[in-house]
Amino acid sequence: MSQFYFGVDYYPEQWDESRWAHDAARMRAAGFNVVRLAEFAWGVLEPADGQFRFEWLDRAMAILHAAGLQVVLGTPAASMPSWMAAAYPDMAIVDADGRARTFGSRRDASPAHPRYRDYALRIARAMAQHYAAHPAVIGWQIDNEFGDRCYSDHARRRFQDWLRTKYHTLEALNAAWGTVFWSHTYHEWSHIPVPRSTTHACPNPGLHLDYYRFLSDLYVEFQQAHIDVLRMYIPPQHFITHNCMGFTYSLLNYFALARPLDLVSWDNYPIAFWREPAQMSPAAIALGHAAMWGLKRRNFWVMEQQSGPSGWHIISPSPQPGQLALWAYQAMAYGADGVVFFRWRTNPRAAEQNWHGLLDYDDVPRRRYFEVAHMGAQIAAVGAQIAGSIPVYPAAIIHDYDVRFSFQIQPDNRDFHYENHVLSYFAALHARGLAAVPMALHDDLSACRLVIAPALRLVDDDDAAALTRYAENGGVLVLTMRSGTRDRSNAMVTQTLPGRLAALCGVTIEETDSLPTGEFRALRWHDDSFGQGCASIWCDVLQPTDAEVWASYADCWYTQRAAITARTVGRGMVIYVGTAGDAALIATVLARASARAGLTAPLDLTGTQGVEVTERQHGTERLIFLLNHGGEPASVTLDRPMRDLLTDTALEGVIVL
Ligand code: GLA
């Protein structure tokens, strides 16, 4: 039977050694079986160039191990020591305005700097050699939350090499980017710039997209170098992971980053002070989990789960009673086999003095600690029955980082946000009790009967063929505005839009209308019973060539022209939605699409507010997760007898959550 990992992020280096044993005992009392350590400890592991100090960590790990805690060890490159920054001023990360960032936060070294890379790998090697055989260690986290874009001269040289490998000749590069425009033809590789701020806010979109791809590749390569070093020393049963930042983080291609990892993990902060209200909804949190499961289509861990009010200069609201466990169970509901709370005790000093752990500054256990400890007792009883079971995702959403990068460069409309657009489709399915997994276009989609491809702007021949095959084989495919309008070089296509997808959708786009903020277009639906909703942000004026019209525009200069169409393709169907659309529009489209695909929720919750339902399966055993996100008890009617895993009691009829 598998183990469910339940733990806490701990920083022994930040506390007096006399507290470690008490901390370890209290962690065990909370039901924790794992701690993550050391990912920010470079400065104390290597206080001077080449002088390693593992004694303190040895002592801390001995105490934690003796208490029965397993350890995930972090390699510490996310925060370089001060001596390194002083010795190499050109190691600093450089922003898009060309300003070198001052040492004093974290992620302040350029991933393109060769000496930084050497130093990072040297400390990783030293840790692997020292701890490979340690009995407490079960896995390794490489670095911490890779990300941030660097525009340094080191990065520029690496970019030029990357381009040489990609294009081979300058002719090919010039053609792909269309550099004849504004006299930008490149005659030397060394003349190619990085897209720092330019005189106009419109540098070349082809160069820009390649730069974002290159920077993502740079981190993937940096991580691979770490993996290669660790694997020389650590036993095969140790896993290697990296803590990603969920769906909302958009500067890295997480599919590529996840590929060589044994385990995906991520950091879940539902009420972070920087989030908009919509980004804190249960559906938005769920999308983070689903996206992380989708990276490898394998169970994941939450390596940092919010434990209290969070904040740097601004402090977020506190998680409400019950919410910490709710979030942790929600992670399980979408496929987590481990949840690690960030952090143990709140540090009164330094950059995260406002970022609360389970314990407050005074070390007195209060509500947050007791709630998590209560969950710890439940996990000790039933965790092994859940770990390793597979979450059920009946639908998929095509998630494409090149497309995200492309929309970062040109969103086309002031109010268009790719992430929000994806979330709006995910949330509409979520409201129907249908979990959708974000997947890459060339993953095997055949197990999903419904696939949404929101704003799939970059499409090549292979992409179009994959989507066509999917529909011909019986899938229901929903494509939305801007899909198929560009090629993978980020150039507009010259075929009639939607380009390579026009034949598949059975429509052409005759005109487009990018709407001003706050303007909507009314729709006339196929018939009165069809549904509701109006067009927003963007309107494609469609000419059906071989498709049925579901909705047309009304009360504007393209009145009666098609907005949403459907076409039967082989055994499947392709729906084209030529607008971003409000929530009612998306709900209407997905009600029909999911009915056509024959999808049903694990439990029908029609009429119940605020309750989320998902399913995991263990062979023929079905685990139904019911999560009440509301502030009040909620009644749910079961459609068959079930057993409550947490209390080991039989359930039937109406139950109260
Ligand atoms: C991230 C980091 C942690 C910590 C938390 C809170 O997720 O990985 O080190 O900084 O955020 O800010």
Image (cartoon, rainbow, N blue to C red):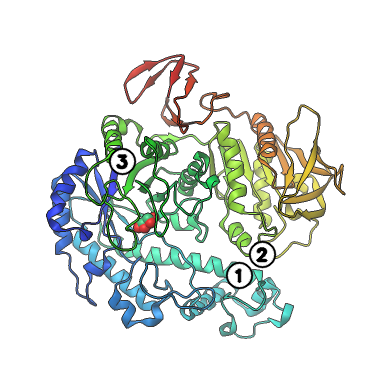
- What is the spatial separation of the Cα atoms under label 1 and label 3, in whole angstroms? 45 Å
Locate residue 426: give its quadrant: top right
The relative height of residue 458 versus residue 193 in the rendered view (above or below) is above
Q: Give the distance between the C-alpha atoms of the residues marked 2 and 3, in whole angstroms.
A: 48 Å
Q: Residue at x 41, y 56 (%)?
A: 260
* Residue 608 makes an appearance in the image: yes
Q: What is the number of the mark on residue 490?
A: 2
Q: Which residue is mark 1?
A: 208
Kindly report which numbered mark, 1 or 2, lies closer to the viewer in this rendering: 1
Compare marks 1 and 3 and give the one earlier in the sequence.
1
Please name which of the two marks, 1 or 3, marks the residue nearer to the observer: 3
Q: Amino acid at mark 3?
A: Arg
Where is mark 3, residue-wise?
Answer: 368
Side of 574 where 339 appears, left or right: left
Disc on res. 495: none
Name which residue lies at 33% across and 30% down.
385
Mark 1 and mark 2: Cα distance apart in space: 9 Å
Does ligand 1 reach within 8 Å of label 3's beta carbon? no
Is the residue 25 above or below the residue 114 in the image? above
Q: Label 1 is placed on what type of residue?
A: His
**Amino acid marked by disc 2:** Asn
